[in-house]
Amino acid sequence: MHTNSLYQEVILDHNRKPRNYGKLEHASHHATGHNPLCGDRLDISLQVDERDQINAIAFQGESCAICKASASMMTSAVKGKSRLDAETLINEFRDLATGKLDINSPNHLGRLTVFSGIRDLPTRVKCAVLPWHTLHAALNSLENASTEADHDPVPVVSNNT
Amino acid sequence: MKNSTNHSIKLDAMNEPDWKIIRDDFPILRLTVDGKPLVYLDNAASSQMPQQVIDRLVRYQTSEHANVNRAVHYLSEVATLEFHRARCKLQQFVNAAEDREIIFTSGTTDAINLVMHGYGRKFIKEGDEIILTTLEHHSNIVPWQMLANEKGAKIRVVPINDKGELEIDEYEKLFNERTKFVGLIHVSNALGTINPIKRMIDYAHQYSVPVLIDGAQAAPHLIIDVQALDCDFYVFSAHKLCGPTGVGMLYGKATLLEAMQPFKGGGDMIMSVTFEKTIYNTIPHKFEAGTPPIAAAIGFGAAIDYLTAIGIERIAAYEAELLDYATELLNDMPGVRIIGTAANKTAVISFAIDGIHPHDIGTILNQDGIAVRTGHHCAQPVMQRFNVPATSRASFAFYNKKSEIDALVAGIKTVQKVFL
């Protein structure tokens, strides 16, 4: 794969102007994801209502363009969705990034498929997936979730503040 | 067995080696990545292997292999002799007084862990203090932390200045009657800083404190003389000096090695075993339990031969030229900041580009076939000191050429253009 096809305008744009960047004042759910390989870290906070709907979501942290764009687009994608729909997206995105998803089969990823090229850069898969693992940890209030995906090394996620 | 052409052998008669011919010794450097010639600038992580060392490994595996120090048959004798010769080559390379002061380990990390278990666990007690520096690689931090936690000992850390140099005055102030060990990196892997270890060893010895030198980044670029340095332990790996992975060495003063307890138990490290009592073998065997990495150790010896035939001084002089050239070019690039500007450096340049994460830099440089290391370089305290999560690091070897530094500069411009 030519790397230029990964650093597409949409990804560069989300990196430059990340959406939903910051921290929620009254979050119902929270988690922090770490990438031990590069020292990157990402905080995700959520407001999930009693009907299990994600009303608000925000992220902040220190990360590369791939991770930041992935987080920015993820927050845009799951805002207003039910928790169940968010989990479906998490699974589909993980499969996309690790090359297990056939993009031509029906899925809910929409513009998130710009990340399909990441499957050819195994060392960068964890950058794209870190926000999604962190979201999963936040939604499930995991004390200390290690993202045991099919790639190594894995990002480490915890919801310690 | 016919030896391959050894370009290096002709060098003794020459003042300045032909670095282009030397480069041809490295078959891997002919690779292309995505149609672009490979520009390998990640030598501080691992160096490449010349044909001469590859041939040595093949010769060992095709005509000399058996287990060592055991049987009386022909191959075992050949393998034992060649393994011993590799040890003697290392002894000469670091100028150790005796060959039994050289222990084969699986690498630098293993060697440090050996000293931590063999010396630290026997001699370091509750309330004792271990001095380390901010520049240490995690491999010279974590074992000592484990020991400190186990024993109730304390780690004291030597700070660095803004150039990435150790603050020697602060180092000297850390000593007191509780100081029992010093672990000191010779050359910083993250920044390239060459530390004034002779002076620091002498100071520690005024307090009768033993000093371990992590020479992983020094041995490929500097002349090592453990007797002149008077260090107590010196460790490094083969794969950073054109040898194979999986082998490294520990030099230790014989008196210390003899006083230490074994690290691993098993075959070869014993004199006699009954279920009541085991009598340990003499050094170096006491610390080499089990079948050692025989092939890798012999390859290590061949790599030492290769480097010494070229001459470490010549290598250092040429690499300094590459460092000066690259430093000047990168200093002239807007938005590029070199991290680690010590007066005394090996050919390592850690750098940051404004607003661009090192991992994105690494991925885009890779598109042009350029291999640099991006990340924290297993030296997170250094990153914390400079307030960055990670850096990009270009590290040069004697087989690199100036045109590859030009390629790096062009690659950095491409990175900046993508993120404009």
Image: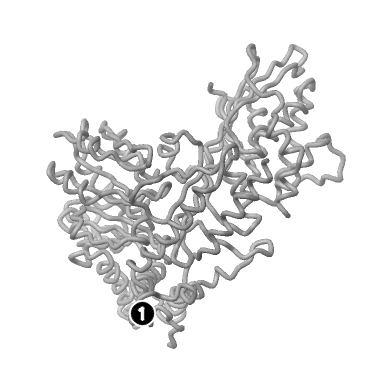
Q: In front: B247, or B75? A: B247
* Dot 1 amino acid type: Met
Outermost residue, bottom direction? B2
Residue B4 in view: yes
Residue B272 in view: no
Outermost residue, front direction? B332
* x and y percentages locating residue B303 in the rendered image: 39, 70
Q: Above or below — where is B236 with respect to A56?
A: below
Q: In front: A81, or B159? A: B159
Q: Above or below — where is B169 with respect to A60?
A: below
* For residue B358, side relative to residue B13 (left or right): right
* x and y percentages locating residue B212 in the rendered image: 26, 49
Helix or strand or loop: what does disc 1 sit on? loop
* x and y percentages locating residue B381 in the rendered image: 40, 37
Going 49% across and 74% down the picture, which residue do you hit? B20
Q: Please, which colouring scheme is shown?
A: one colour
Residue under label 1: B14
* For residue B154, side relative to residue A112 (left or right): left
Q: In front: B410, or B284? A: B410
How many numbered callouts? 1
* x and y percentages locating residue A3 in the rendered image: 70, 51
Going 43% across and 87% down the picture, which residue do you hit? B1
Look at the image and tell me in which quarter the C terminus of chain B lies: top right
Q: Above or below — where is A6 with respect to B293?
A: above
- Which quarter of the figure has residue B57? bottom left
- Which quarter of the figure has residue A95? top right
